[in-house]
Amino acid sequence: MSKKVLKTSPEGRLCQFPKCTRLLSIYNHQEYCRMHLEQMAQAAKPKPNGFSAR
Ligand SMILES: [Zn+2]
C-alpha cells in the first residue's frame, strides 16, 4: 500500500526572479514567488490586440 506523502520543497528557497528576495513556501514548488508567477503568466499571454498584425 502506498502512503500519502505530502510533497514539500526545501525550506528557505528564494524567488529566482532577479532582485526578488521573497522567501518561497515549502508548499510552493515553483521557482518564483506568487507575485512573479502571476506576472510571468500575464506576460506570456498574447495581447488582446496582437492578432490583427498580418
Ligand atoms: Zn519574486
Image (tube, grey):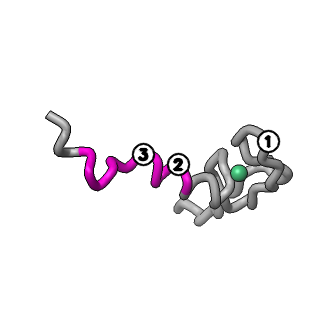
Residue 48: image x %, image y %? 29, 55
- What is the crowding at mark 2: few (fewer than 14 residues within 10 Å), some, or many (at least 20)? few
Query: Disc 2 and disc 3: Cα gap in Å?
Result: 6 Å
- What residue would you read off at disc 1? 19
- State the extent of the magenta-drawn residues as a range: 39-50
Q: Secondary structure at mark 2?
A: helix
Q: Amino acid at mark 1?
A: Lys
Check the picture and name the quadrant holding the C terminus.
Answer: top left
Which mark, residue 44? Answer: 3
Q: Amino acid at mark 2?
A: Met
- What residue would you read off at disc 2? 40
Residue 46 is inside the magenta segment = yes
16 relative position to 2: left or right: right
Q: Are marks 3 and 1 in contact (CB under 8 Å)?
A: no
Residue 47 is inside the magenta segment = yes
Disc tally is 3
